[in-house]
Image (spheres, rainbow, N blue to C red):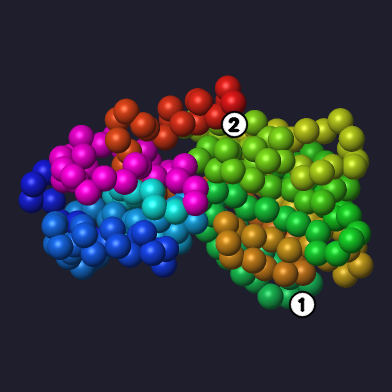
Amino acid sequence: MGESTRIAFTASGHPRAREALAELTARYGDCSRNDADVLVPLGGDGFMLHTLHENSDRNLPVFGMHLGEVGFLMNRFSPDSLPERIAQASCFSLAPLRMHAETIQGEVRTGLAINEVALLRETNQAAHIRILVNGTERVARLVADGVLVSTAAGSTAYNLSAHGPILPLGTEAVVLTPISPFRPRRWHGAVLPAAVEIEFQVLTAERRPVSATADYDEVRDVSRVVVRQADDVRHELLFDPEHSLDERILNEQFL
């Protein structure tokens, strides 16, 4: 990539992002996503997640620039020398998680998660969840507010708030973390191989309803959820070399 790089821009609804969109398209042009070499979203991490989900079938490398509230997955914003920055960027390949969720009504829903799949209680009653890993029972009854499975990129998000470990990029693993667990009291979660299959069975799902979310897609009243890596989907994230994602993840462990 270089001066002839074809860039497709997209922006969140934030006023600063809209202003930046006008400035950048006037300066570099704006081609369609079907013809682009790279996609440049302008906003925060939430908008970046939406952009990745909306373009999962295009296999475009993505160079985000931060113009929102949180920008962990984004680069600093600057309108100057954008093609050169893209050409010099380091690339991180991310495989999302695929969620297969079944509801107590028999409905089946699927979703992709770049950060995490989370199961959460819907009422004031704690969730009761059985956990199987590759078909073997590992937790007979987790009594908690919920439980989540996180990718390495998502390990600094909800997983970190739930006191789960941070995974360095390139680690072929996912994190299984309970959310406010009551029983087993001493179980703090697990780091598992990326190729693992994790099954959650919601016990007494009618009396203790649980929802499941894949990033921002929610399924209510689930009875069973299976999570595995989506090997057929890859997201290519581009970062300025001096502020790469693996450096940010490293820094998070010393805050």
Magenta stretch contains residue 91:
yes
Mark 2 vs mark 1: give the one in front.
Answer: 2
Binning the other alpha carbons within 10 Å of mark 2 as few (below 14), some (14 to 19) or many (20 upward) gives: many
196 vs 163, left or right, is: left
Residue for point 54% across, 54% down: 113
- Residue 187, which numbered label? none
Nearer to us in this view, 98 or 43: 43
In the rendered view of the protein, which quadrant contains the N terminus? Answer: top left
How much space separates mark 2 and mark 1, taking CA atoms?
A: 36 Å
Helix, strand, or loop for circle 1?
A: loop
**What amino acid does circle 1 point to?**
Gln
**Residue that carries the numbered disc 2 in the rendered image:** 166
**Residue that carries the numbered disc 1 in the rendered image:** 105
The quadrant in which residue 191 appears is top right
Nearer to us in this view, 187 or 25: 25
193 vs 12, left or right, is: right
Q: Is residue 16 above or below residue 187?
A: below
Q: Is residue 31 above or below residue 180?
A: below
Helix, strand, or loop for circle 2?
A: loop
In the rendered view of the protein, which quadrant contains the C terminus? Answer: top right
Residue for point 36% across, 31% down: 243
Q: Give x and y (percent) for residue 222.
A: 75, 66
Residue for point 82% across, 51% down: 145
Residue for point 30% across, 35% down: 240
Residue stretch in magenta: 69-96
Q: Give x and y (percent) for residue 149.
A: 64, 45
The quadrant in which residue 51 appears is bottom left
Q: Give x and y (percent) for residue 234.
A: 39, 49
Magenta stretch contains residue 52:
no
